[in-house]
Image (cartoon, rainbow, N blue to C red):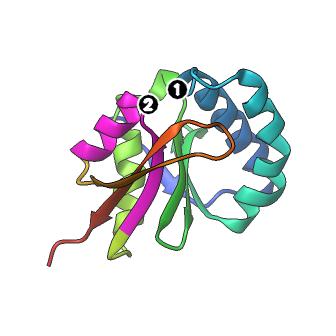
Amino acid sequence: MTDTTIREPREEELDRLVDIWLKCSLISHHFIDAHYWQEQKDAMRGLYLPLSENYVAEVEERIVGFVSMMGDYMAALFIEPEYQRRKIGRSLLQYVKQNREAIHLKVYAKNGDAVNFYKQNGFHISGTGRDEATGEEELFMEWRKKD
């Protein structure tokens, strides 16, 4: 396991989070036109990140990933591709699970790696839907703390 520090980001680091989000979105959501993701950059930086409770994962003083929560809704969990499969995503997930009874999220059905990651970390599929913006099928996933 990589030695990872988890902390809240500073305002001047939000651009780094947007960079990670865009890079990962282009790779993991390759089935959606890249132009769509480019158009979302300003909203991510100016709206979604400021409205969320964000935590970054830092390795050797470099931000390599982040998670964004809106209450019990996980709006984002992205890890730099070269740092994936090092348990960093799992560490961020465990961090946000600590103070919650439940977490729910949406993930594109075609993003099999993410679906499998969430299943391996205690989430189950609770429903399906269609993302209005992209037309892609989404899975609704949920985790609940065990008594």
Q: Is residue 3 visible from the viewing direction of this image?
A: no
Name the foreground residue: 38 vs 9. Answer: 38
Residue 110 forms part of the magenta stretch: yes
- The residue lying at 47 percent from left, 44 percent from top is 138
Instruction: Examine the rendered structure and indicate whether residue 143 appears above or below residue 76.
Output: below
- Callouts 1 and 2 close, C-beta under 8 Å: yes
The range drawn in magenta is: 103-120
- The residue lying at 35 percent from left, 65 percent from top is 97
Name the foreground residue: 19 vs 137. Answer: 137
Identify the amino acid type marked 1.
Answer: Ser
Q: Work out how far the residue at label 1 is from the one at label 2, CA to CA, in angstroms.
A: 6 Å
User: Residue 47's quadrant in the figure?
Assistant: bottom right
Q: Is residue 33 visible from the viewing direction of this image?
A: yes
Sequence order check, earlier mark of 1 and 2: 1
User: Residue 7's quadrant in the figure?
Assistant: bottom right
Q: Position of residue 102 (x, y in %)?
A: 34, 71
Q: Position of residue 141 (x, y in %)?
A: 36, 54
Residue bearing the label numbered 1: 28
Residue bearing the label numbered 2: 111
- The residue lying at 55 percent from left, 47 percent from top is 66
Identify the amino acid type marked 2.
Answer: Asn
Front tag of 1 and 2:
2
Name the foreground residue: 79 vs 102. Answer: 102
- The residue lying at 45 percent from left, 56 percent from top is 105
Instruction: Examine the rendered structure and indicate whether residue 147 appears above or below residue 26.
Output: below
Horizontally, residue 11 falls left or right of residue 121, namely: right
Q: Residues within 10 Å of mark 2 (few under 14, many from 20)?
A: some
Residue at the left extreme? Answer: 147
Horizontally, residue 69 falls left or right of residue 119, namely: right
Residue 28 forms part of the magenta stretch: no
